[in-house]
Image (tube, grey):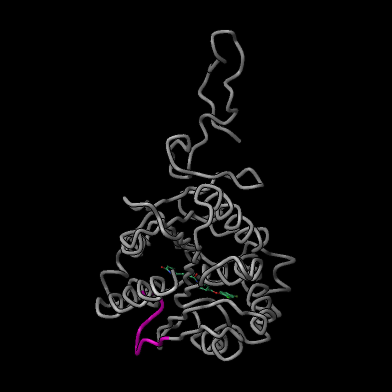
Amino acid sequence: MCVRKEGQLGGLGGEMPSEECADRVTPQGSLYRELPHIINTDGQYLFCRYWSPKTKPRALVMIMHGAGEHSGRYNELAELIMNESIFVFAHDHVGHGQSEGNRMVISNFQVYIRDCLQHIDHMKEKYPGLNIFLIGHSMGGAIAILTANERPNDFAGVMLIAPLITLQPETSTPTKVFLARLLNYVLPNIGLGSIDPNFISRSEEEVKNYINDPLNYHGSVKVSFAVQLLNTVARIEEILPKITWPFLLLHGEADKLCDINGSYHMYDTAPSKDRTLKVYTSAYHVLHKELPQVTSEVFTEIQKWIVKRL
Ligand SMILES: O=C1CC[C@@H](CCC(=O)N2CCC(COc3ccc(F)cc3Cl)CC2)N1
């Protein structure tokens, strides 16, 4: 619903203001009309970020963030890519950051993919003929895989930073999966536990940044959300053997949030000719916010991988 000021009348003639949602505000209280945004097909306002090069862009890159975080956490990576005369764009997924929607709740995972395709189509209209690359992290990696899978010939490459491809064996035994699905019918909003900030990175500064960032969600993973993730993992398992587009997989060897075996499995199963997997010894989940040495290697790897495929 739209927030309207008390006693606000239409224009002088008494007609109602043209945009019926002139005062739509972000979950943090900012006016969407003063922010870059798109409106998805469910009418939800999604906050967008654009990193526009000074020179004519020679490619497009879309960044898809992970669960419980937001697009602002990709500023450094986006600026690095923008400095290669590439136009970088992103939005906060439904239920995340400065976009609308209950925090980390999604009716169907396909909404994330649908919204990304809408944003991609919008950018292709503005910049026709340019190659488009996707970068996805964690749950955003799953979104990137399923987005590329819907348009197998549309993307010049997909870069995946610790993508969600398979379940952590210890946290999702068949019994727990069965119970989660059963519970979803009776208590979908029950919390299963939240992401342990210490699993984010070995950098204490980055763990602190994650904890103190008000745009991150630190609440519990709801059963209904977990079931959407389970369904997504099952969907990805099915399509891996059909993947032919170029991809770069980057994964921390000590990742406790997204099992590195998912990346090994994708590397071994997808028939793509152009595929690369780089494993970072002892590194945790968020490689782009890991110890400086790892993060700088990751940035360089991504930058080189894109430039080589422009
Ligand atoms: O910078 C940042 C900050 C946050 C992080 C991104 C986090 C992210 O996206 N994750 C990690 C957690 C993972 C939980 O998965 C499940 C949970 C229950 C379940 F029953 C089944 C699954 Cl699969 C989903 C993917 N990166």
Residue at (60% x, 28% y) in the render? 20
User: Which portion, as a residue range, is magenta?
Assistant: 278-287
Q: Is residue 143 magenta?
A: no
Residue lying farthest top? 13
Q: Position of residue 293 (x, y in %)?
A: 25, 80
Q: Position of residue 52 (x, y in %)?
A: 37, 51
With respect to residue 172, does 67 lie above or below? above
* Left or right placement of residue 208 versus residue 137 in this view: left
Q: Position of residue 215 (x, y in %)?
A: 41, 54
Residue at (58% x, 76% y) in the render? 245
Q: Position of residue 7 (x, y in %)?
A: 53, 16
Q: Is residue 281 magenta?
A: yes
Toward which corner of the image does residue 251 lie, by quadrant?
bottom left
Helix, strand or loop: magenta stretch: loop
Residue at (50% x, 80% y) in the render? 258
Toward which corner of the image does residue 192 lie, by quadrant?
bottom right
